[in-house]
Amino acid sequence: MSEGESSIQGMFTRVASRYDLLNNLMSLGAHKRWRLAAVDMLRPNPGDLVVDVATGTGDMALLLAGRVGPDGRVVGVDFCPEMLAIARRKASAHPQGSICSFIEGDALGLDLPDDYADCATIVFGLRNLTDIAGGLGEMVRILKPGGKLLSLELSAPQPSWLQLYLMRAIPWLGRRFSFHPPAYEYLSASIFNHPPPEKIARLGKDVGLAAMDYYPLFGGLAVIHLGRKGS
């Protein structure tokens, strides 16, 4: 693990216990609607095997489990054991939680075989990768031919009032409610430093997707990218 990856891992370790609370506060609950929109767009089939990269506390993995049903399987991967512990607790109380497995791993070197999954997802994790193209390439590698890759990520929005919110309100909420305020200063900066949606789409095609389209949400504050691996 590189020094940059180790620093980000340590940051998420320190914010794990209040990660869900801060997500709700910062987005006013909108992150839940964005996840639902992403799953609706992905349209996994019953019985599919889905890998959720940078799964965090497991919210996306559990949404996916509800869609693939008892004959499917969801594998959540994250490099933060503290986040995975929360995900496992959530799964134990979820109707389809038994089809979820949560494993510690690196998004830039997934310990999973080639042509393994029907779908791969990454939610609010792509901008934290030290090598975005490398992370996308790993997800493409583990997909079966024709498999689908979905990213849901925060992005620099168009409306100026949303830009001001990201620059001022998110760091303030981090200082007020987090045990590690610098993480939320990083969050605000990482959104503006993240490549624009059209560049992410090009990177997806460069690493083996037949096509990658993108769909802005809420003035561009969140963006869904969806692509399919070539045959």
Image (cartoon, rainbow, N blue to C red):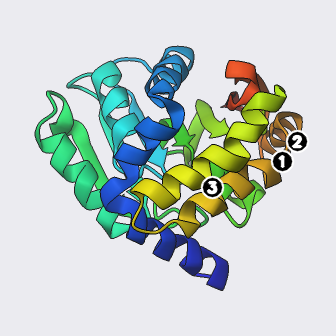
Secondary structure under badge 1? loop
Q: Name the residue located 34 percent from the left edge and 44 percent from the top edge.
A: 58
Lower sequence index among marks 3 and 2: 3
Q: Nearer the viewer, mark 3 or mark 2?
A: 3
Work out whether residue 82 or residue 95 is closer to the camera in this orientation and state it. 82
Q: Name the residue located 41 percent from the left edge and 18 percent from the top edge.
A: 45
Label 1–label 2 contact, CB within 8 A: yes
Residue 187, placed above or below residue 116: below
Q: Which mark is residue 195?
A: 1
Q: Name the residue located 75 percent from the left edge and 21 percent from the top edge.
A: 219
Question: Which residue was labeled with disc 2?
Answer: 199
Quadrant into which the N terminus falls: bottom right
**Is residue 155 at all visible to an observer of this figure?**
no
Secondary structure under badge 2? helix
Pinpoint residue 226: horizontal percent, then vertical percent. Answer: 67, 27
Question: Which residue was labeled with disc 3?
Answer: 187
Residue type marked 2: Lys
Q: Name the residue located 83 percent from the left edge and 45 percent from the top edge.
A: 203
Residue type marked 3: Leu
Pinpoint residue 220: horizontal percent, then vertical percent. Answer: 75, 26
**Distance Cα–Cα, label 1 vs label 2:** 6 Å
